[in-house]
Amino acid sequence: MNKKWWKEGVVYQIYPRSFKDSNGDGIGDIRGIIEKLDYIKKLGANIIWLCPIYKSPNDDNGYDISNYRSIMDEFGTLDDFNELLVEMHKRDIKLVMDLVVNHTSDEHKWFVESRKSKDNPYRDYYIWRKGKDGNPPNNWGSFFSGSAWQYDENTDEYYLHLFSKKQPDLNWENEKLKSEVYNMMKFWFDKGIDGFRMDVINLISKVQGLPDGHKGDNDLYGNGFPLFANGPRVHEYLQEMNKKVLSKYDIMTVGETPGVNPETARLYVNEDRKELNMLFQFELMDIDSGSEKWDLKPWKLTTFKNIMYKWYEALKEQGWNSLFLNNHDQPRMVSRFGNDKKYRLESAKMLATLLHTWQGTPYIYQGEEIGMTNVEFDITEYKDIEIINMFNEKIAQGMKKEDLMKSIYAKGRDNARTPVQWDESENAGFTTGEPWIKVNPNYKEINIKSALEDKNSIFHYYQNLIKLRKEYDVIVYGDINLLYKNDENIFAYTRNLNDESILVILNFFEKEVEFKLPKEIEFKHYELLLSNYKVQDCGINNISLKPYEARVYKLQNS
Ligand code: NOJ
């Protein structure tokens, strides 16, 4: 297996708006990040993925970019950015920026020009079509509710927006647009950044003719997803991007790719194809959804394990996995897959053990390392365009508010976007002003200051996990042997590389369970490397696991 720095590293994801405010305007900023680099260094993460910091009117918190080469006013200036990069590199931390090129803001100068007239030189940078009998060009719905098309009176045509109407989709069939994107990428690489996380990169090629999607009887819109995800020219575009830009630098890339399966994923990450290094696939994130994201469904550990193992097998020799259980679009992992009440500490550590001992690059989302939890706000207190639009659309369809609130509590993106809880002072030490979104009321109990003071904290457990990863090659590169595939309580596996072996045993629930080491696992000596409980050494053949217990052992044959 090819050794790479981005396989061995640990990524810390920053959502700048909610990370740390340095100037009291209630919005996190670049100088706030600079202040906290030593904290990230102390945790041990050595790569930062920074969500968009470019100029933006913030319809979707920076994922609607109006200028790719300058910084959002609230976040600071290019000078601040340059300083951030220098300070990161001084600490041996790499910087991965967000690349959002499926769409821009409608306030980007390309779009401002594009909408002026049909013969404007920028017209074709976007996807414009005539309506059909007074209706949009096709029946696709947007990810943020409503139609994916917006009518523009000025030229009597519609433009496509898979996300909000302030996020028009770019037309990748236009050669000039592609070279503008490549030049913009070079601009950031030449500043010295170390990679890109590519926003919905598998949506950039749409099926020719933009036909209607399938529409069920109760659906408001047709499902365009199969027609714009993993589209006909996406690999051609990425191979070109790789050849013209990515291959010229020692960088990492991770593509955000909703709706890939193992076969389609390999086409993006197989090293021989020269496209991307890793993907974010969302099969685990869909495990508790019924017909759609907001339709809640219980999940089973066997399904969870099968998904993890399937993706390990799919990419083990032909790519690389990224490992995450939450990010800025997902609820908090301890609330979703653990227990954010009685066993918050134990379950957060148990889940972290999985992420940091499986094969792939682990991603830590800000606040995860102290076990930050979901929130339950009043509907008027939410800020996320996805939540607000969904709520309004479904209320208009006659759905009950209390049912919708349950879904928002469980799945809403704002769960992840409440400010990082730095200490027990007002606004959790995030800002001296009025925070742009409410702070989670549990900040007096859950905050970084107290985590740093407590040897037993989730933070210190993460530190230990990251240290182990640096020490043992087998944790990064070892094969996985999944034990007890069909067990509904325990997730256990060994990792093996040459003569190194690691055994990981995780109790995923509150119930105490017995673990029996399978006979085929041979070892002469064992050593406990890490656990989230104090362990009394009674051997490892039969272990009685406490609620959410996690143990990592080293096994030796000589
Ligand atoms: C995925 C991003 O992670 C999400 O936050 C954003 O709303 C959409 N892409 C659109 O850019």
Image: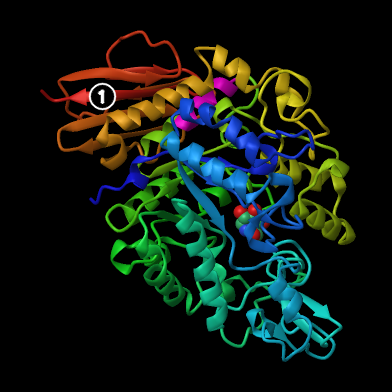
Residue situated furthest top in the rendering = 536
As drawn, is 413 to the left or to the right of 250?
A: right
Q: Which residue is mark 1?
A: 554
Q: Where, by quadrant of the figure, is residue 172 drawn?
A: bottom right
Taking the image as drawn, is residue 249 in sight?
yes
Q: How is the image coloured?
A: rainbow
Q: Nearer the viewer, residue 64 or 459?
A: 64
Q: Is mark 1 within 8 Å of ligand 1?
A: no
Q: Please tell me whether residue 347 belongs to the stretch shown in magenta.
A: yes
Q: Where, by quadrant of the figure, is residue 148 drawn?
A: bottom right
Q: Position of residue 504 (x, y in %)?
A: 34, 29
Q: Position of residue 67 (x, y in %)?
A: 67, 63
Q: What residue lies at 53% left-to-right and 76% top-to-bottom?
A: 178
Q: Which residues are magenta?
A: 343-352
Quadrant in the picture for the C terminus: top left
Q: Please tell me whether residue 71 belongs to the stretch shown in magenta.
A: no
- Look at the picture and state if 421 lies above or below 540: below
Q: What residue lies at 77% left-to-right and 26% top-to-bottom?
A: 427
Q: Nearer the viewer, residue 388 or 21?
A: 21
Taking the image as drawn, is residue 290 in sight?
no
Q: What residue lies at 40% left-to-right and 63% top-to-bottom?
A: 246
As drawn, is 497 to the left or to the right of 158?
A: left
Q: Quadrant of ligand 1?
A: bottom right
Q: Amino acid at mark 1?
A: Lys
Figure label count? 1
Q: Main secondary structure of the magenta part?
A: helix
Local secondary structure at mark 1: strand
Q: Position of residue 262 (x, y in %)?
A: 40, 60
